[in-house]
Amino acid sequence: MTHNPEDISGNRIFVNRYRHIRELFDDADAFPDVDSVDRFYRKLLSTVVLQISVSKLSDAFSVFSSLNSKGLPLTLVDLLKGQFIGEASRKGIDKSETLEDWDEFAGTFTAKDEDVNVAIVTQFLLNNYDVFESTGTKSITKGKALRLYETVIQDKYRRGSNYLDTLLSRAELFAMITRVDGHRNADARIDRQLDALKRLDSTQAIPLLLSLFSDQKTFGLTNDHVSQILDVLIDFYVRRNITLVPKSSNTRSRMLGLVRELTAPTGPRGDAAVQLIASTLKEISSSDTVFLETLKSEGLYDKNAKTARYVLIALERGLTGPSSFDKGHPDNLDELGNKGKPIWTIEHILPEGENLPKWWREMISPDNPDPEVAAGVQGQYVHLLGNLTLTPYNSEFKQKPFVNAKNPYEDGMESYDKSKRDYRVNGHFVGMRHPFRLNASIPDTANGETIETKTDWTPQDIQRRTDLLANEVVKLFAFPEDASEK
C-alpha cells in the first residue's frame, strides 16, 4: 500500500477515497496490529452491498427512513439539495455553482461557526410552500413536502427560472421574521415589533408576515402600515396566549386565508389591507369581556411564562406614575445577561415552590396553616397576575418572608437580605420597595397602605392587585376600531 496518493492513477474522487482509507489504517487505536487489520479484511469480504433503485425522490426518502429508523435520519433538506443539483445540471448550470448557491441559502439560517440549522431550514421550506406555491389554507407536512417540492423544482427549472435564487431572497426575509442572528429590519420600530412577536411564540403568523414583507410594495403598504399590522398582531397574540382562543391550527389556517385574500388580483391595498387583517384578527380573538375574566380568574405564569413576562414589561412601561428609569439608568427590561438569559425575570411574591415555610403558611391560611391546606391556597393564587412582578434578584428572594419581624430592616442599612419587601443592595431597594410602577399596586393605597407600612401579603391582596392590573392589560392590548390608531 503506497503512502503517496499521487502514485495512484485515476480521478480525484478515487484519490480522496484512498487517502481517507489510508488515514483509517494509520489509527493505532483502531488497528493496533496486523491481526486487527486481518479481522477487518475478513469482515469486509463478508459485506453484501444491496442496490435499491427508485424512480422518485419521495420514494427514496421512504425507503431510507425504513432502513435507517435507528440511524441518523435523512432530512428533507438533504434530499432537496440533491434535487436542486440534478435539475440545475439538466439546464446546463454547473454543479459547483449550484452548490455555492445552496451553501449561501443554508447559511442564511446558520449562526456564526455553527452547523446548518436543519430545523429552521425545514420550517422555512414548509412556510415557503404554503405561502407561495399552494393555493389553499391547509399546511403541508414534512412527509408530503418532498413530493410537492420535487414537482415545483422541476417545473421552475423547466420554465427557465433559477428557483434557488428565488428561495434565497425569501430566506433572507424569513430569517428576519424568525430573528436568526444578524438578520434585522432597517426600520428600528418594525424590528422591535418583530422581536416582540418572537417572544410571543407567534409562529402561526409566519405565513402572513412572509407574504407581507415579500409583497409589501404590491400590497401598497408603507412601513407605517406594516407597523400598524404588527401592533395588531401583538395584541392578538397576547390575548390568544392568555385565553387560548383560537387554537393554533385554526390560527394558521386563518393567516393563510388572509394571504389568499391579499394576493388575489382584486385584493385590498394600503389602508384597506390593514383593516382586513385587523378586523379578521379581532373577529377570531376572544372578546374584551372574556379576556378580562380570564386574566382575573386564571393563572398567567403557568399558562405561558413568556407572555407573562412580556405583559409585565408592557405594564411597567404603560402604567402611569414616576419611572425608575432615566437617562442615567436607561430601560434595560428586554436586555439579556452574559449567558443569554433575561436580566429581569418574573418574581412570585407569594413563592411558587413546594413546602412553604411556616411564615408563608400562616399568612395565606391563618385559620389553618396546615401544609396541605396552605398548598391548596398557594396553588389557587400563586400564578395570578397580581402575584407577579419583575426583578433581577429572583434567585436571591426564593421563599423569604414578605416582611421579617424578627430581623427587621432598619433605616440606614446599606444592605439587607432578610425579607422580600426590604431587600436592599448597596443602598438601593431591589425587592418590593423598588420604585417600579408595577410595585406601586402592592400596597392597598385605597385603604391608606404604603409599601413601607404594608406587612403582609394575602390571597385578598393578590386578587385585589390582579383585578387592578387585569383592567390595565385589557386597555394596553385592546383592538382599535381603526388600526391606524395604534
Image: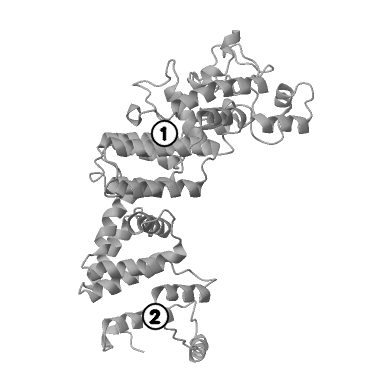
| Number of numbered markers | 2
Say if residue 91 shows up in the picture: yes
Q: Which mark is residue 45?
A: none
| Disc nearest the viewer among 1 and 2 | 2
- Nearer to the camera, 101 or 116: 101
Q: Quadrant of residue 405?
A: top right
Residue 431 in the image: above or below residue 383? above
- Nearer to the camera, 325 or 90: 90
Q: Which kind of residue does numbered mark 2 sit on?
A: Ser
Structural crowding at the residue carrying mark 1, measured as other residues with C-alpha within 10 Å and reported as few (<14), some (14–19) or many (≥20):
some
Q: Which mark is residue 55?
A: 2
Q: Quadrant of residue 300?
A: top right
Tags 1 and 2 touching, CB below 8 Å:
no
State left or right for residue 434 relative to residue 483. Answer: right
State left or right for residue 169 relative to residue 77. Answer: left
Residue 358 locus on image (x, y percent): 74, 26
- Give the distance between the C-alpha atoms of the residues marked 1 and 2, in whole angstroms: 53 Å
Structural crowding at the residue carrying mark 2, measured as other residues with C-alpha within 10 Å and reported as few (<14), some (14–19) or many (≥20):
few
Q: Quadrant of residue 188?
A: top left
Say if residue 458 shows up in the picture: no
| Mark closer to the chain start, 1 or 2 | 2
Residue 57 locus on image (x, y percent): 39, 74
Q: Which residue is mark 1?
A: 334
State left or right for residue 246 relative to residue 274. Answer: right
The residue depicted at 46 percent of the width and 87 percent of the height is 49
- Nearer to the camera, 170 or 274: 274
Q: Which kind of residue does numbered mark 1 sit on?
A: Asp
Q: For the N terminus, give its image quadrant.
A: bottom left
The residue depicted at 50 percent of the width and 20 percent of the height is 434
The residue depicted at 59 percent of the width and 7 percent of the height is 448
Secondary structure at numbered mark 2: loop
Residue 349 locus on image (x, y percent): 60, 26
